Amino acid sequence: MAQQFNFDSAQPTVLEPGLTAHLPEALRRDVPIGPRLVGGTSFNGKLALDGAQVHLLAQACLQGLDAARQVVFGWQRQGQSLADIYVRGITPCARLIGEWWTADRLDFAMTTIVSTHLQQLLHDFSAEFLQEASPQRHGWSVLLLTEPGAQHSMGLFMLSEFFKLEGWAVTLGVPQDVAEFKRLFQSDWFDAVGVSVSTDRHLGTLAALLPQLKDCSLNPSMRMFLGGPMAMREPARLKSIAADVVAEDAPTAVKWITQCMHLASFKV
């Protein structure tokens, strides 16, 4: 069960000057200042989740999980829905952390810690997020898999939350190798299977394996799709794989797949 937090007593997060000493040297010069970024309740209108706010969340994650939660609480007090926070706050924050890592502004340990904090935010707010789930159950089931041996699964977990919001039954798998990937794929009847592709390490394997797995699946009409970082950055590299490539954000992808299922059911 997800932890519950007291929203009324939550205090806004302010990155005080003394706390910047805990940040990596390369990031201290970028600490945002000023009332626009403190997450308080004195603003007029809905707070925009712009690049500065994403930057604030990243720095809060460097301070710790509690600081990251306070940023999200502040966004909620400004009227942001969790769906918007997930897509316009947490997702670009993860992308920003990846850019800092690539530019050697964060080491591996700090990158791992921040990524863990972002994923924990999704788990912490899951129960509240799913309170708005569709009462209509389509009866469809989806298996969501990372590529074999993937290091990160935050994006796939977020996708699973939006599927649940649309009334799907979701099975989530993080296979450590190709053998486990095959076992999970063949473990049950699924209306759809989605694979998150983060790297190009397994493109050849997936191109050969997925058609075979579909042919042997319990559901001969199963729909397959690919997403993840590779789909966002280089969708053309996935076109050789016998599956639909979905490069949209999580809610858009889920709505598109759900619409495809509706259209297919009308044709039967």
Image (cartoon, grey):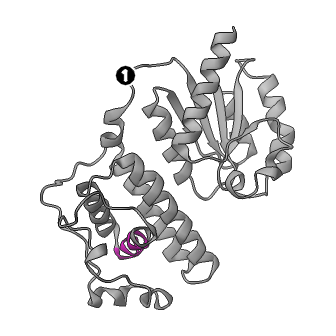
Quadrant position of residue 40: bottom left
Residue at 22% across, 62% down: 44
What is the crowding at mark 1: few (fewer than 14 residues within 10 Å), some, or many (at least 20)?
few
Quadrant position of residue 252: top right
Quick one: quadrant of the N terminus?
top left
Residue at 52% across, 31% down: 170
Of 121 and 90, which appears nearest the observer?
90
Above or below for 228 versus 49: above
Residue most extreme to the top? 268
In the picture of the structure, the residue carrying the numbered disc 1 is 135
Of 145 and 252, which appears nearest the observer?
252
Say if the magenta span includes residue 47: no
Amino acid under disc 1: Pro
Is 180 on the left-hand or right-hand side of 132? right
Of 135 and 113, which appears nearest the observer?
135
> Can you give x and y, in whole percent of width and height, for residue 58 in the image?
43, 71
